[in-house]
Amino acid sequence: MAQRIYLDRKWRFNKEFSEDMINSPMEKSTLVNLPHSVVETLLSYFDESIYQMVSGYQKSIFAPTQWENQLVSLVFEGVGHSCDVYVNGKHLKHHDCGYTAFSMDITKVLKYGEENLITVKVDSRETLNQPPFGYVIDYMTYGGIYRDVYFEVKEKIHFKDVHIQPSLLERVSTSKRTPKQIKMMNVQGIIKTECSMPKRIYKLVAAERVFIRQYLDDSLLISQPVGGLEEREDGYYLSLTSAPSTVKLWDVESPSLYTVKTQLLVDDKVIDEDTVTVGFRSSEFRKNGYFLNGRRLKLRGLNRHQSYPYVGYAMPESMQRLDAKILKEELALNAVRTSHYPQSHYFLDECDKLGLLVFTEIPGWQHIGDESWQDIAVKNTEEMVIQYRNHPSVILWGVRINESPDNDKFYARTNEVAHKFDPTRPTGGVRCIAKSSLLEDVYTYNDFVHSGKNKGCAKKADITSDEEKPYLISEYNGHMYPTKPFDDEEQRQEHAIRHANVLDAIAAEPDISGGFGWCMFDYNTHKDFGSGDRICYHGVMDMFRNPKLAASVYAAFSDTETVLDVTTSFDIGEHPACNRGKSYIISNADSVKMYKNDVLIKEYFPTDSSFENLKHGPILINDFVGDAVETDGEFTKGQAKLIKRALNEVTLKGFRPTPTLAWLAFRLVVLHRVNPKKAVSIYNKFIGDWGGESREYKFEAIKNGEVVKTVTKAAVTSAHIEVKPSHTLLTELHTYDVANIRIRIVDQNDNQLFYFTRPVSFAVEGPFEIVGPKVVTPAGGATGVYIKSIGEDGDGKLTISCEGLETVTISLSVECLTK
Ligand code: GAL
């Protein structure tokens, strides 16, 4: 039976490759584990040339004699970017894509019962003639063997590939059902399977010695002799169809998964077995929107790069899965675009598990190279589709180079390949040109029209070249409003509001299938982009995945978690001329009560939001006074009403003679006889936040009549460190594990201290290593640290300290399940 043997541990690595490494053990080298990055970088201000090199990796492996009559393949899940693999001195494979897997048959070159030398030459220079290289790129393209490597040992008769195509026998509609009902719903499923097998199977089939069996979870679906093989140029194909009686739907609300186990038997003995995790769903892009299981669903997603601080692309399973969890559970999204290349299967597995829809695409950025470059892109398309088509979460293939010009000849090829290898899913292709040539099934467009004051997105009819085809926004915002976590309050708030503006605009356009904001988190980039420090501050989170204000706009879509965020600290000195201007409440509660020094000022409801198309859009705070003037006793009812309006007008718009303010002042002075000399004292008494009693604003989120969350904004009197570890039990399976610890410096009310800059230090005890520096400076009051296990079981701790703050310790453990 087939077995997979991971080879992630103990590679020798040398930053310089030389030919003599092909045949003999490397002399100068360091011992590394995979995933590995050719360099560890700084967080910012480092040059993209540092990861560009031709390096060597080497590993010696014992091949047991039991393997002698089997088929042994060597599989690399991802190597940045071009590589040559040698086994026992023999060149076996050249591969030109940093983002897809590749494998090779090493049966004939292995020495059984002996050690074997695997040498990998890895070229991570950006001068390579392959996607995404050739011109500028707005992200770093780190090098190294950064995903898993393994042996696959199989019988000579085996499945080369098994493509499972589950679908629904009949159209279902979930439109009027609650998430709970969708979860309970049973549907009639159907499974089409296409197995490819090596040519040598034919004789056995003819002799009727081969049998096929298929199970859905534990129930037997198919048991029959293999007959009727279709001969194609690369082997024999077998098509199967089975119809399990009823299954539960895979949906964003309830992603029910099943395993389909397909077995190949010769003379009654199982000789190969392939297990695929599937979901039964119908997914359709129609000209009037996207439909999942017959229900219209507005796609609400963000773009995700696969990069991390310090180690580039090289992060293990748990960190890949964490990003999917953050997108679905913290940001309440239903979709993600894996910009601008296929990403880790661990990330996709988690999307399958959580019900996060995926738009994945071929590598590339704006530039189209020469013919051989294009040939590689076509190959990349084939590899992407074959390698990712079994994931139920994938709903769309991106088969154009992101934002490239039209090129019908080239894109006819990528479209054809995608359709050939997956007849079940549509193609898209991301462009930034309106009315461009449309060979794909869905017009996917980067809409950067929103500049703050105008509408959030263009109309489909104004962009697409074929209104009969579906339309999707693949990017918005991003470079239109880069926002650092340490930018001032107005910038951070405007960033959040712009995301809300676009979401609101998309929600109002029924024929737009949805949108993917740019982007999930800040990322390191080339000199041509970003803020000069090699960072693009386009994320709704920072590089450590700490949320910015804009993250709350997305989080407020959650049906399960209560969100309450207030866009201001109420410190007027943060604003020019002390005019705070507009501030918002971001919440998905039934209502939010706002208090000033424990006196209720106003209760806000979702309907108070001016974002008409959002269920829970940001709500403008338009009352800072409440009943205070009226109950004060000094003024008549009429005077109090006008004073309140004047005070709110000044608070929102500053001390500017707006027409409204002039009209209110006229009425107060001339008609209601209020002495204009009292203006300053009235302001100081009811609004002015300096001198006197210190002010405290409290916000209570109410759900079902209960206070479920509170935010209090008051003068800062103390600070502390708040930590959010991804997990504290690190598990080593076939390689090291990493935990992410998100860190915020917050005040006595847990409000982030955006301008806190004192250094924070890390120390570990136990079987751990700190990834990156041991002393960092928080940016925007937040930072993070990654802790890596080192291959030993045990307990330990991480200590986080900062001058003047209480030290925080986190207990950590490692469990090694295999060594
Ligand atoms: C787009 C591009 C993205 C990113 C973004 C920034 O043009 O596709 O990769 O650079 O701009 O807003």
Image: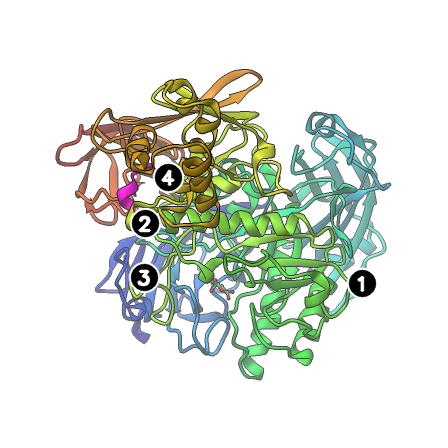
Q: Earlier in the sequence, mark 3 or mark 4?
A: 3
Q: Earlier in the sequence, mark 3 or mark 2?
A: 3
Q: Amino acid at mark 3?
A: Val
Residue, far top: 706
Q: Foreground: 247 or 454?
A: 454
Q: In percent of the image, x 48 and y 20: which residue is there?
A: 708
**Helix, strand, or loop for circle 2?**
loop
**Helix, strand, or loop for circle 1?**
loop
**Helix, strand, or loop for circle 4?**
loop
Q: Amino acid at mark 4?
A: Thr
Q: Earlier in the sequence, mark 4 or mark 2?
A: 2
Q: Tag on residue 38? A: 3
Question: How far from the left and from the top, in percent, is residue 392?
Answer: 66, 45
Mark 2 residue CB less than 8 A from any atom of ligand 1: no
Q: How many numbered marks are there?
A: 4
Q: Earlier in the sequence, mark 1 or mark 3?
A: 3
Q: In percent of the image, x 26 and y 26: which residue is there?
A: 748
Q: Foreground: 679 or 392?
A: 679
Q: Few, some or many C-alpha atoms within 10 Å of disc 1 (few <14, some 14-19, many ≥20)?
A: few
Q: In percent of the image, x 37 and y 42: which residue is there?
A: 546
Q: Tag on residue 468? A: 1
Position of 195 with respect to 502 (left or right) is: right
Question: How far from the left and from the top, in percent, is residue 426?
Answer: 72, 58
Q: CA distance from mark 4 to mark 2?
A: 10 Å
Q: CA distance from mark 2 to mark 1?
A: 45 Å
Which residues make up the magenta segment? Answer: 569-574
